[in-house]
Amino acid sequence: MILITRYSTKKSRFLIDSFVNHISIVPNRYRTIRNRLKSQNNKTERWNGVQIKSPIDDEKYYDHDFDFDHDLTNQRQSQKSLKQLFKEDFDNRLNGGFNKRKIVRSSPFVNALYENDRNDNKHRIKNKNHRKEESFLQKLHEKYENQRQQQEETGEKKKVPLPYAITEENRFEILNEIMMPLHKLPYNEQLKRKLYMNKDVLLSFGSKLRHVNRMILMRQNGNMPCHLESVRPSPLTERYRNKDEFSIWPGIDDNAKTVGFFVGQPSKHDRVVCVEPDQLIITKQSHIDLAKKFQQYLRDVSPLDVCQNYGVGGHWRRLHIRSNRQNDQHMLTAILHPQNLDDNELREEMTRIQDYFADDPRVSSLYFHATRHTRSTHTKNEPYYHLAGDQTITEQLFDKTFVISPDSFFQVNTLAAEMLYRQIMTEMNLTKKTTVLDLCCGTGTLAILLSDQVRKVIAIDSSESAIADAKKNAEMNGVRNVEFITGTVEQELSRLQSESYLKTPVVAVANPSRRALHPHVIRTMRQMSFINRLVYVSCKPQGDALRNFVQLCSSVTNDRYNDESPFIPINAIPVDLFPHTEHCELIVTFERF
């Protein structure tokens, strides 16, 4: 490795002179250089792919050995010859180019790596790094192996104590702090806090954009890449949830069959308490009453135990309750782990549940689900069993009607969802000639609402059951210009690039899960130049969605996402769908100019 300046050849040669003068006082170093250069005599070197003869091969300097033990005159003569040799060799290498250059930031120097230096050192460095990596992996493996053996001996993982001193008197207060961390603040103060939270998201977005797109002006928006509007408040702040997922776990009185919400995490804490939702103001009273009734069924009727550990045993796990806006339809789904129960035992339990809730007029739909997975999802091997009532419940949004199945996605705050969809449609700037791409469409709610305002809607989702519900909803509302596609967005979007009907003005809308869009989706949308506007809706913009924002706007020349002109953020609107919590939907509108 030789250090040279990048300002002038004179400075470079001066540095070489200094380098030679410095090493000339060390005879051993001279011998090392001499022996190394002699070993390369009559060899050729490659510079920029052209095979040339080394300029030092024919030097008379190699015809004899310098004796560095002679008087100072001989050493000076040796120094002069070697100095001239370095100059000629350096000039040739400078003209031929280097194998690698590294400019040192805030310094007048640059590192130049020659081929011989690289060949001499690369194997040594590689082996050294490989040994370090092997040593690190070996230690890591030993660490986890020791932890695993310790867990096998003790029977469980090491857990931390519960951070709450929960008692019979304060259990409802602690649950309120967990489920509704903002419930003590007036609603206006909650909106201010959520505005600041979204402002921090946009400030972080702007900070990252400075490295990938300096053309976006931020001073006029307070260092944010776009204007941030005020938070749209929820029309309903209490009893607004149309879906609740209750857990079944031991309560504060150690009764294992308690229906409510966790205080603590089973995978993390050594103690977890299930607290009834009696004082949660975000949960409908009808949901609380039905949860109480199911708890009574577990304690009085069901012979099955509660499943606290999949490997230990037990069965009951959760209860899901859904309802509509009018609150005249309720869907209950009882969920358990089958363990070693046979079909006859499962049918007996289903019969007991059916008989217990048969006379309750509030229950319009009753389901049973036996699953070995942590998430309750309808599959061919583990289907939902319909026990009584209707198979779906219906909900109204604007002038459209939607059917909801046990595992359908639907916004938990129906009135605020209408406000959210109205804001999205305004941001999309639609006309009768527009084609809309609805990415992660779910049960097709937005696609159906848009159908009256555009030429065509193409809706994509990976869930077969969600697309099946979407087609039912479209048929129920007489919608003909929506095409529902089952598949991953990254695959289906790539296939749609060649479709001729997408050459007209296209507006895309994306409402993904908290994991955000796959990077391939971002790259494909960048390649689809006919998409001139994108409305991105995120329920967690602080996470992976922020990475999507940066990828959409990147203009770095070596960035794989800049196949076409970047998107520019033009507006951001927070919408509060979850009063008394820290969650908030954020709508960000992007456009290409």
Image (tube, rainbow, N blue to C red):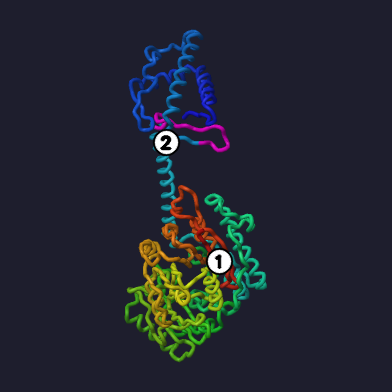
The residue lying at 41 percent from left, 32 percent from top is: 118
Name which quarter of the figure residue 467 lies in. Answer: bottom left
Please provide percent x and percent y for residue 319.
46, 78
Using the numbered discs, state the Cα–Cα distance from disc 2 to disc 1 in whole angstroms: 48 Å
Is residue 322 among what the camera can see? yes
Is residue 252 among what the camera can see? no
Please determine whether, in this image, residue 235 is positioned above or below residue 268.
below
* 40 or 202, nearer to the observer: 202
The residue lying at 60 percent from left, 78 percent from top is: 235
Magenta span contains residue 119: no
Magenta span contains residue 107: yes
Please provide percent x and percent y for residue 496.
37, 64
Describe residue 531's horizontal placement relative to residue 200 as left or right: left
SS type, badge 1: strand
SS type, badge 2: helix
Instruction: Pick whichever of labels 2 and 1 is earlier in the sequence.
Output: 2
Amino acid type, residue under disc 2 in the picture: Ile
Name the residue carrying label 2. Answer: 125
Please determine whether, in this image, residue 448 is positioned above or below residue 38.
below
* 317 or 406, nearer to the observer: 406
Please provide percent x and percent y for residue 518.
43, 60
Please determine whether, in this image, residue 430 is positioned above or below residue 356.
above
What's drawn in magenta, residue-wise?
Answer: 103-118
Amino acid type, residue under disc 1 in the picture: Leu
Name the residue carrying label 1. Answer: 586
Circles 2 and 1, Cβ within 8 Å, touching? The answer is no
The residue lying at 44 percent from left, 51 percent from top is: 560
Please determine whether, in this image, residue 393 is positioned above or below residue 80.
below
Disc 2 versus disc 1: nearer the observer = 1
The residue lying at 52 percent from left, 17 percent from top is: 25
Describe residue 72's horizontal placement relative to residue 377 as left or right: right
> Dot 2: within a 10 Å radius of its alpha carbon, few (fewer than 14), some, or many (20 or more) residues?
few
